[in-house]
Image (cartoon, rainbow, N blue to C red):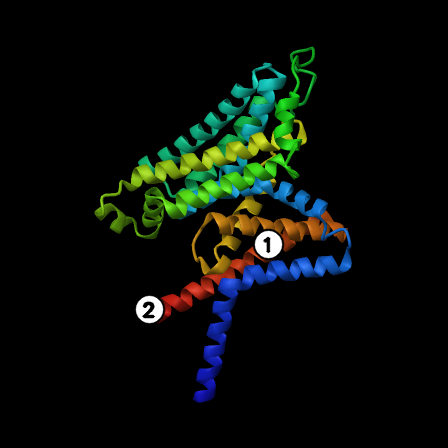
């Protein structure tokens, strides 16, 4: 009996260790492994490239984080990013609008998608997954219809005849391609948004209200919290982050690519759930989300250096997500059993 008890204790301690430090241990192992097989991996230039590559995914994932904090889930962020991408490019290439409008109008598009999601979920009472899945298809169809199925680029031929009059300006492209103080501008934008999200979620009253809403909506209501308004705000914030990701993507690649956000949706979701277990947080959080995006970004960068076929990357991403979910939910089940 003593041996069995000791074995169970070791198993429990192992699960607890994996929950708190598993993601960090995985990151260290990945870095050590790829550093041992490639001299190009552990360099400043490569790590700045990794940070730049995860900047867009991190913005998407921060939006998903806010919806998960309130007990929801936004599947429409990828389509919203795609719509924002083509709207951003079209405003310059088709309509030659000034930079400030090129930034503001796509963000308003994200706000609109967030409002529609909130209406479906909060007012009509449709479950989050079903509502945002529906919006994912609607927004995806709308952005393809808007562009007639074409990507948008400088001086592109128009279906009505002639060529587009405008171009993406140098000032706009600097947002995605420029450097500042030795780091790419997208990295500074990402770090700034992560910091703002962290402060809001963990050091403001509103952040506590968000977590209270997601943790126990009934208790939040009894405490005087208007959970409908809180959920409404969370989905609007998610739309804003998705639009920012679209703007940044356009500035990064220099064109408006259709379906740009589709492949990034699952990376964003994986980043959020990997972040659950960073230092034992056990809940969606901004720092964990950034860390999760970094784990996935570093892993994919190393696999690229190894010349692994790109079509195998989804297997790796899926395995990382399953591992993170397994550790998180096994630990949660153990803790619930002990307190129950």
Of residue 132 and residue 42, the one placed in the foreground of this image is 42
Q: Is residue 330 visible?
A: yes
Image side of residue 334 versus residue 228, left or right? right
Residue 7 position within the rendered picture, expressed as x and y whole percent measured from the top left: 49, 81
Image side of residue 123 versus residue 194, left or right? left
At a point 36% along the width and 44% down the height, the residue shown is: 204
Residue 277 position within the rendered picture, expressed as x and y whole percent measured from the top left: 49, 58
Residue at the disc numbered 2: 339
Q: Is residue 124 visible?
A: no
CB under 8 Å between callouts 1 and 2? Answer: no
SS type, badge 1: helix
* Label placed on residue 318: 1
Total label count? 2
Q: Quadrant of the N terminus?
A: bottom left
Whichever of labels 1 and 2 marks the residue nearer the N terminus, that label is 1
SS type, badge 2: helix
* Label placed on residue 71: none
Measure the C-alpha gap from mark 1 to mark 2: 31 Å
């Amino acid at each position: 009996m003593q041996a069995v008890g000791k074995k169970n204790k070791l198993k429990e301690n192992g699960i607890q260790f994996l929950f708190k430090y598993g993601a960090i241990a995985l990151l260290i192992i990945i870095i050590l492994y790829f550093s041992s097989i490639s001299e190009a991996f552990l360099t400043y230039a490569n790590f700045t490239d990794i940070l730049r590559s995860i900047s867009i995914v991190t913005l998407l994932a921060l939006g998903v984080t806010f919806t998960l904090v309130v007990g929801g889930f936004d599947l429409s962020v990828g389509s919203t990013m795609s719509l924002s991408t083509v709207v951003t490019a079209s405003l310059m290439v088709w309509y030659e609008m000034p930079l400030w409008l090129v930034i503001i109008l796509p963000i308003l598009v994200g706000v609109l998608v967030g409002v529609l999601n909130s209406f479906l979920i909060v007012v009509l009472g449709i479950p989050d997954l079903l509502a945002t899945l529906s919006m994912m298809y609607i927004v995806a169809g709308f952005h393809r219809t808007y562009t007639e199925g074409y990507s948008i680029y400088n001086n592109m031929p128009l279906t009505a005849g002639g060529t587009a009059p405008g171009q993406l300006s140098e000032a706009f492209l600097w947002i995605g391609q420029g450097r500042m103080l030795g780091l790419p501008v997208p990295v500074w934008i990402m770090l700034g948004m992560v910091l703002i999200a962290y402060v809001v979620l963990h050091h403001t009253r509103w952040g506590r209200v968000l977590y209270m809403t997601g943790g126990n909506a009934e208790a939040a209501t009894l405490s005087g919290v208007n959970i409908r308004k809180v959920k409404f705000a969370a989905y609007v914030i998610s739309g804003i982050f998705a639009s920012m990701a679209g703007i940044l993507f356009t500035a990064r690649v220099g064109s408006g690519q259709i379906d740009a956000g589709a492949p990034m949706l699952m990376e964003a979701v994986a980043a959020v759930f990997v972040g659950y277990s960073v230092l034992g947080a056990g809940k969606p959080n901004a720092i964990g989300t950034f860390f999760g995006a970094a784990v996935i970004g570093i892993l994919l960068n190393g696999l690229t250096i190894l010349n692994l076929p790109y079509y195998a990357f989804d297997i790796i991403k899926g395995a990382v997500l399953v591992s993170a979910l397994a550790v998180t939910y096994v630990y949660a089940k153990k803790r619930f059993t002990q307190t129950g």
